[in-house]
Image (tube, rainbow, N blue to C red):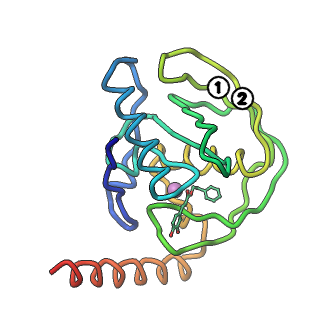
Amino acid sequence: MALLPILNYPDPRLHTVAKPVTEFNADLKRLVQDMRDTMYDAPGIGLAATQVDRHVQVIVIDTSKEQNDLLVLINPKILTQSGTQTYEEGCLSVPGIYETVTRAEKITVEAKNASGELFTLNAEGLLSVCIQHEMDHLKGKVFVEYLSPLKRNRIKTKMAKHAREIARNSY
Ligand code: QAP
Ligand code: CO
């Protein structure tokens, strides 16, 4: 088991656009396993490769309470979407911050699993929100970018203060 360091907002590397996966090999399987371990350890319900500074289109999600229902999405594409819903979102890259975001209610997603097999998935509610949130990461977008500039700047200031405190504590 390996835990990967998670980038914290406003790290500029969080704005990197991820490339599609082309080789479904052992390296990819290791990345997926390490991302799963990192997400479960946090604990979180979703993690995109961008957040661990790997700029490929890989997402792990598990919205179950028991952490026994892992969903791996590689090169995901939204085929259809409908409706809107608002949800209080958080992010492992923006610890301690929870804000309301409006997104599509229902989505149909096409993706590959770690073996390279294509599948489609219908999602609504929390799972739908989580998939959209993680797909944004792959495009270099963090959920705080949906907030007003005022709120976003307050969060940036708070995160910078938090980072200074961590630096001081480990000194
Ligand atoms: C994205 O987020 C998400 O602030 C996944 O201190 C979140 O796993 C999609 C976390 C909500 C939809 C709804 C956040 C852990 C985990 C924190 C997460 C924290 C510790 C966030
Ligand atoms: Co996130």
Residue, x 32% and y 44% (percent of image)?
Answer: 2
The N terminus sits in image quarter: top left
Disc 1 marks which amino acid? Glu
Q: Looking at the image, which residue sits at the far right?
A: 83
Q: Secondary structure at mark 1?
A: strand
Q: Nearer the viewer, residue 36 or 98?
A: 36
Horizontal and vertical percent for residue 33? 41, 35
Q: Nearer the viewer, residue 126 or 84?
A: 126
33 sits to left or right of 77: left
Pointer 1 residue Cβ closer than 8 Å to ligand 1: no
Q: Which residue is mark 1?
A: 110
Residue, x 56% and y 14% (percent of image)?
Answer: 117
Q: Which residue is mark 2?
A: 121
Measure the C-alpha gap from mark 1 to mark 2: 6 Å
Is 110 situated above or below 48? above
Disc 2 marks which amino acid? Leu
161 sits to left or right of 170: right
105 sits to left or right of 69: right
- Circle 1 packing at 10 Å, graded few (<14), some (14-19), many (20+), is some
Mark 1 in CB contact with mark 2 (< 8 angstroms): yes
Is 125 situated above or below 42? above
Horizontal and vertical percent for residue 19? 39, 32
Q: Quadrant of residue 37?
A: top left
Is 84 situated above or below 171? above
Q: How many marks?
A: 2
Residue, x 69% and y 69% (percent of image)?
Answer: 100
